[in-house]
Amino acid sequence: MSQTQVGQTSGTTTFPLTFSLTPSTESRTAVEREEILADPGFGKKFTDHMVAIDWTINKGWHNARVMPYGPLQLDPASSVLHYGQEIFEGLKAYRHSDGSIWTFRPEKNAERLQRSGRRLALPELSVADFIESIRQIIAVDGDWVPSAPETSLYLRPFMIANESFLGVRAAHQVGYYVIASPAGAYFADGVAPIKIWLSTEYSRAGRGGTGAAKCGGNYAASLLPQMQAYDNGCAQVLFLDGETSSRVDELGGMNVFFVHGTDRLVTPRLTGSILEGVTRDSILQLARDRGLTVEERDVTLGEWQDGVASGAITEVFACGTAAVVTPISQLKGPNLSIGNPDAPAGKITMALRQELTDIQYGRLPDRHGWLTRLDTPAAQS
Ligand SMILES: *Cc1c(COP(=O)(O)O)cnc(C)c1O
């Protein structure tokens, strides 16, 4: 068997991995599962199985398996626990009205995991193996994909350095896992605009940092400003760029968009400190399809302030896989308030949200080929 291995970040197996299956002996009954699916919340309940794949610097990826969901055994010296060498992804499985199960642009998540991996000196998993790992979890736990409106099975692939070694270098042993968690409708009582808090004290990313990588460390650094947001009655934090503190970066888990007038959509360009969201990219495409003028460029806090004051900026929203599209009514900060907290969700915001979810749930034709069917053998997708 030939394997290519060039330095730390390779170890890519040339042949697709095959997965073994150890069924859980403690799977929930259909009744127990339906009880959970009736009110799953977000990220609290998990399905009966998980995927695991091992990687070592000598063997590359191997031992791909589907196994009962349960605690990982980690040596206390595992490098992820000390140096935070970790990356993750987030995507959803959607049930269509005919019962079939689909996911949205998984190759984008696979490629982003590879990019995040390069930045965090973690090995690359092939796009095919990533997508197969998603298929494998659906093959055993497909019944966990809920069918109520706007619900889904949230899929969380992640990769950790699990070598027992306290020396500071890229780990020679890594684990990749996929867990799955049923998710209720994010806005159970209808889409409600949120207030967001401007962090003037903290940045989430700096030049040359890990802002474009989906890694746990970025989130760890965002938790304190997130607490300050809550303390100020806001749901999320807005981060400015780390160099000049004048440009709008993102929310730390969602990308930001501005509607100008009725026909222009503006979002911060990808500077290396912004996470390249799959939702962001899809919204840009849907906006172009509608004939909106789309601009990816610098957006300053001043432009936001002046634009809302003059009426040039008519809508602001955030987007990401979990909440899809979230209208923003107000930006608050120390000595700052932009927008009206009682403003309703914008028309273009809601139209884009509706169109995106209609495609994801199979209610509109998949004109861009964004959907991958998960509950069939790969050749039929
Ligand atoms: C995951 C994430 C997003 C949203 O990305 P999607 O692919 O749209 O879910 C935005 N910002 C950060 C920092 C993220 O981690």
Image: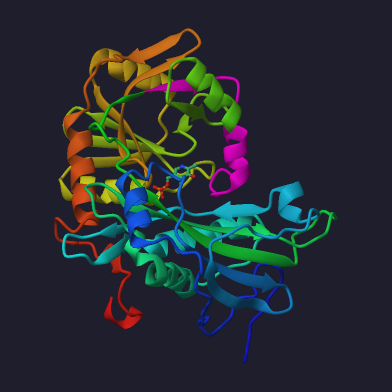
Q: Nearer the viewer, residue 183 or 323?
A: 183
The residue under the point 24% across, 55% down is 147
The x and y percentages for residue 69 are 53, 62
The residue under the point 27% across, 27% down is 192
Left or right, residue 300 beside residue 175: left
Q: Quadrant of residue 106?
A: bottom left
Q: How is the image coloured?
A: rainbow
Q: Is residue 205 magenta?
A: yes
**Ligand 1 shown in quarter:** top left
Left or right, residue 111 beside residue 357: right
The residue under the point 23% across, 17% down is 311
Q: Nearer the viewer, residue 371 or 247?
A: 371
Say if 262 sits above or below 213 in the image: above
Left or right, residue 101 beside residue 197: left
Q: Quadrant of residue 362?
A: bottom left
Q: Is residue 242 visible?
A: no
Q: Nearer the viewer, residue 309 or 106?
A: 106
Q: Is residue 38 magenta?
A: no
Q: Which residues make up the magenta segment?
A: 195-222
The x and y percentages for residue 349 are 23, 35
Which residue is outermost to the bottom? 1
Which residue is outermost to the right? 167
The x and y percentages for residue 272 are 53, 45
Say if 330 sits above or below 326 in the image: above
Q: Quadrant of the C terminus?
A: bottom left
